Image: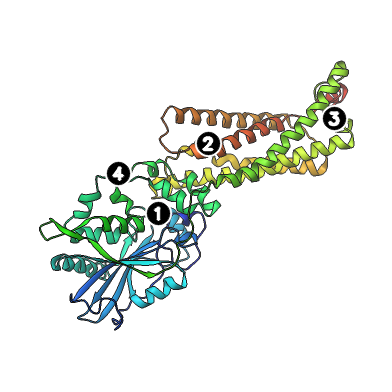
Amino acid sequence: MTFYRGRMIRLMLGFAFLANVAGTSRHALGADSPAAAQGDPVEIYLMTVGIGDQIHSRFGHTMIRVVDHTDKTDAVYNWGMFDYADPAFAWKFFKGVLIYRVGVQSFSRTLDTYRYEERPVWQERLNLTPAQTRRLLDRIALNMRPENVRYPYQYFYNNCATKPRDYIDEAVDGAVKATYGSELARENHRWYVRQYLNDNPLVGLGLDVIMNGDIDRPMSKWDEMFFPAKLREYLIAMPATDDAGRAIPGKQLLSGTEELLSLPDASSGDRNAFLYAQMFFGLPILFFFMAMIGVGGIRRILSRHHPENWTGRVAWNTLDTGHQVLVRIALACLGFGLAGWSLLSGAFGTIHTVMWAISAHTDSHHNANLWLFWPTDFLFAVLGWRALRNALRGSVRRRPILGASVRFYAGLHLVALVTMVTLREAGLIQQDVDRVLYNMGILAAFIYAATWFGMMDFGLEQKQVAVSDAKE
């Protein structure tokens, strides 16, 4: 499945696995066609395209090639077409109401497209009886009628690979589903998302967080054929059948593998995209705690030597220049970490909530990660800005009501995080949130702990200063 040309929003379109935009006219069969010397009037091939190095081509693509020697045509049918110029494309995808269509282009133009994209292409001939061939051609012809060319796209269950799968299965009287419908696949949908979409850190992290436990359920090999390479693999492995549904000894459903474009697949692999978030948000929080430890040392020293004169707070003018710099560093680190985390956590919380409310993507509903990411976390951006402002001004302004409220909110987050871990360990959360907890959960705990301490005053303050503050 491959995306076509056009700009896609990088996170939400990590879900979609589409095909390159194709023409819609029939084209003459070339004299150099590999099927020209065959005796059958019509030959049908399954074409499989390898993965590309762009997000929109990470899952490959499937097409059906029909070579008609009577009409002298060589056409490739493609179920991955969409209107990439539609300005509402991203919003439609977000809501889960995308409409795709089937199109046709010449075999030569198809190869030119993937040669330009530097992607490998294979084809195998479908070994069908004349009656099976006619059923498949009739189904394609019916699908090509103007009123039938469009269909509601779903990236796992109704896409450019499942359409050919369903039509081939119909042609062989359900033999494909009978063979693979009850046999469990080795992997689940989340494995494919991690394996092929984690090359882009934003997409890899985003999809792991946004998609719920539906993609963690075991799936059959029939469902696994949403992935073009698996469709090809499983059809090669099953026998051809006669018109009575009996396996034909020594004959496979797919045979005669040809590598039409001998090019390497793009690299793939499961990379932990959460490490980027840990470094980006975690290091400032680490520096904050290191600076806090330094300021806390002042408190211990002064309170030990003059316990009767100190309340446990630091007045800014009691600090020497070096320790003032230390406090500024702590505030700047806290502000940067809080501001960044607020945007990440608030965005995820908002996306979870909005998609649950309005999107038809059911694998984004009832997401367990809402224990960790809240839409209201955007409020932390205000605290981050306040900490950065104080760092630049060189002041530590106390706001008792604000501090108590923020500490209460951070405490609620810590309670929710502990609850999420407990529910997961008890098996009450079936969604695979382990990677989120091990990475973002630990990071969140440090950030909320930093928020808790950051709302306290730094160090020590003389009693008479505290009294004057109280009078104010």
Q: Which of marks 2 and 4 is nearer the N terminus?
A: 4
Q: Distance between the residues labelled 3 and 1?
A: 56 Å
Q: How far apart are marks 2 and 4 (CA)?
A: 28 Å
* Front disc: 1 or 4: 4
Q: Which residue is labeled 2 in the image?
A: 437
Q: Which residue is labeled 3 in the image?
A: 315
Marks 2/4 in contact by CB < 8 Å: the verdict is: no
Q: Which of marks 3 and 4 is nearer the N terminus?
A: 4
Q: Where is residue 244 in the image (x, y as percent from the top left)?
A: 10, 58
Q: Which residue is labeled 4 in the image?
A: 184
- Classify 10 Å Cα crowding around label 1: few (below 14), some (14-19), many (20 and above): some
Can residue 245 be seen? yes
Q: Position of residue 18 (x, y in %)?
A: 40, 62
Q: Which residue is labeled 1 in the image?
A: 96
Mark 3 residue type: Ala
Mark 1 residue type: Gly
Q: Earlier in the sequence, mark 1 or mark 4?
A: 1
Q: How far apart are marks 2 and 3 (CA)?
A: 39 Å
Can residue 382 be seen? no
Classify residue 10 as left or right of residue 156: right
- Classify 10 Å Cα crowding around label 2: few (below 14), some (14-19), many (20 and above): some
Q: Which of marks 2 and 3 is nearer the N terminus?
A: 3
Location of residue 281 by image quarter: top right
Q: Distance between the residues labelled 3 and 4?
A: 66 Å
